[in-house]
Image: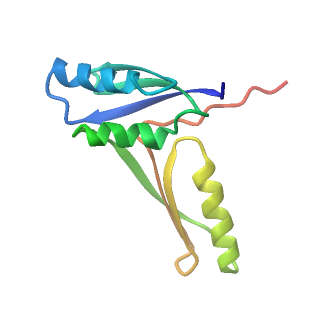
Amino acid sequence: MGERKTATLHITGMTCAACANRIEKVLNKLDGVEANVNLAMERATIQYDSEKQRLRDIETKIEQLGYGVAKEKVTLDIAGMTCAACATRIEKGLKRLEGVTAATVNLGTNSAVVEYEEGWKRKEKQRC
């Protein structure tokens, strides 16, 4: 069994309890997924086994049902890049961050555009 992860997604397009029930039922049929969809909050709280499912695949399943998953986007200025390898390394690092769904680094403009789960907050690591 892989690492158990939890995600909270903002679901768009739900209009009634049947919508929330449909999404929850489909997600709970996915291997390693436990989902709770709240219509009033427009949120899905999802626990999943990271070896069996990827968050992006769960989001795709929601989109295939005809609903949306809200994202936020930020443009960051990046100083110190000197070559394409720098940009590629930074982009790969950004994409590995929890909550990040897409990242594009542009060497020419010294910037990165990062898309991430709406409302995502960085979890502080415990220190000994």
Residue 92 found in image quarter: bottom right
The image shows residue 17 at horizontal and vertical percentages of 18, 18
The image shows residue 95 at horizontal and vertical percentages of 58, 53
- Does residue 80 appear anywhere in the picture? no
**Residue at 24% from the left image edge and 38% from the top image edge:** 67
Is 114 above or below relative to 125? Answer: below
Colour theme: rainbow
**Residue at 70% from the left image edge and 80% from the top image edge:** 82
Q: Residue furthest right?
A: 128
**Residue at 32% from the left image edge and 22% from the top image edge:** 24
Left or right, residue 88 beside residue 120: right
Q: How many labels were placed on the picture?
A: 0
Quarter of the C terminus within the rendering: top right
- Does residue 18 appear anywhere in the picture? yes
The image shows residue 1 at horizontal and vertical percentages of 66, 24
**In front here: 110 or 48?**
48
**In front here: 73 or 69?**
69
**Residue at 65% from the left image edge and 56% from the top image edge:** 93
**In front here: 47 or 51?**
51
Left or right, residue 97 beside residue 127: left
Left or right, residue 33 beside residue 16: right
Is 5 above or below relative to 21? Answer: below
Q: Residue furthest left?
A: 15
The image shows residue 16 at horizontal and vertical percentages of 14, 22
Residue 37 found in image quarter: top left
